[in-house]
Amino acid sequence: MGFSTKAIHAAIEPDPVTGSIMTPIHLTSTYVQEELGKHKGYEYARVSNPTRTVLEKQIAALEGGKEGLAFASGMAAIATIFSLLKSGDHVIVSHDVYGGTYRLGKLVLGNFQLEFDFVDASETDNLKKAIKPSTKMVFIETPTNPTMTITDLTAVSRLCQARKLISIVDNTFATPYFQTPLDHGIDIVVHSATKYLNGHSDMLGGLIVLNDADLTERLRFLQKSIGGIMSPFEAWMCLRGMKTLAVRMDRHNANAMEIAEFLQNHRKVQKVNYPGLISHPEHRLARKQMRGYGGMISFDLGSLEKAKGFLKKVRLCALAESLGGVETLISHPVTMTHASVPPEQRKKIGVTDGLVRISVGIEDVEDIIADLNQALKGI
Ligand SMILES: Cc1ncc(COP(=O)(O)O)c(C=O)c1O
């Protein structure tokens, strides 16, 4: 079955009671049992819900995994994964991960004697050097947010298998349409479903996909114990969005390629980060492990003043956090998504004051370019 067919049919069956082609939204907190110990597979909605079950099966099918788990947000999913750890454990994380993942590791879980080290994972050797006897996990984003660096998924999974570490990839930017980390031997894939999977900027959600039965059991236990689960309505919204993932991603990708080339040729732009450009340092690796480059671009205007001036002038592109919706969103990582990353760390990872990030939408590309062009002219 091809990806687009799977996205519409993999786990989605007409409702057996009514024939409704759309998965019903099961708004219930509990389920009536026939007698003690005899039920239809559902007991209490924090543990499981039929709408959520369909979404969990659906994302598992798209990522090529056995099991899926749905959460209230990407951060709830990531926090649940980190809850597999015990105090004293050490985690290695890509140094330019989403600011919220940095904040959770450094500023929250650090208080529970969990140690997080942030390294440049585009060089697998850096990961190897960071491993200590207490290391338990390697958490990677590729492409990273917002500098768009690429990490070799096969190299990471080999390293983790050899050292018995759990490998985790945040696949939010690429989506399973362009990249399937489990195929490279990665243990756990996590998503902010808020982004491309939903695709319409109208919900929050997190998803986990994996193959290993023992890890699945531990994560399901944590999911019901912590309770950061996705609501039935959000699960339905996410299911609805995922059906069009392939067509949306093709358009995001095509628009982003044109915009990256436009920005690269503009004299007021100092640097463009987009893995689809031949000038990107890891373009060849991206080509090898991805089926497309996605819709995220970042570019440097050289100073905070220029970035501020530019962001004041855009009209079609909306100044907002988040990404992955059908509309083009534009943001300033230093003051928005990465504000909780200390300035010295930001400098180290290339998140400069003049860096602007675009989540390229699926509007007509000429209109997006015209807007960027008029805003660039004004600075
Ligand atoms: C790459 C990435 N991972 C995780 C998250 C967190 O997801 P959520 O906002 O759904 O909690 C985000 C949010 O922007 C993100 O960009």
Image: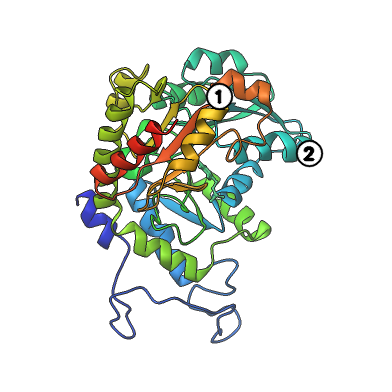
- Residue flagged by tag 2: what amino acid is it? Phe
Residue extending furthest toward the front: 378
Name the quadrant containing residue 341: top right
Residue that carries the numbered disc 2 in the rendered image: 112
Q: CA distance from mark 2 to mark 1?
A: 31 Å
Residue that appears at 50% across and 42% down: 312
Q: Tell which of 172 and 314 is nearer to you.
A: 314
**Sooner in the amino-acid sequence: mark 2 or mark 1:** 2
Residue that appears at 57% across and 72% down: 45
Between circles 2 and 1, the one closer to the viewer is 1
Q: Secondary structure at mark 1?
A: loop
Mark linked to residue 152: none
Residue that carries the numbered disc 1 in the rendered image: 352
Above or below residue 198? Residue 132 is above
Residue 210 shown left or right of residue 326 in the figure = right
Above or below residue 39? Residue 338 is above
Q: Position of residue 135 (x, y in %)?
A: 65, 25
Residue that appears at 35% across and 43% down: 360
- Residue flagged by tag 1: what amino acid is it? Thr
> Can residue 102 be seen?
yes
Q: Position of residue 39 (x, y in %)?
A: 52, 79
Q: Position of residue 77 (x, y in %)?
A: 57, 49
> Can residue 291 be seen?
no
Q: Secondary structure at mark 2?
A: helix
**Quadrant of the image containing the C terminus:** top left
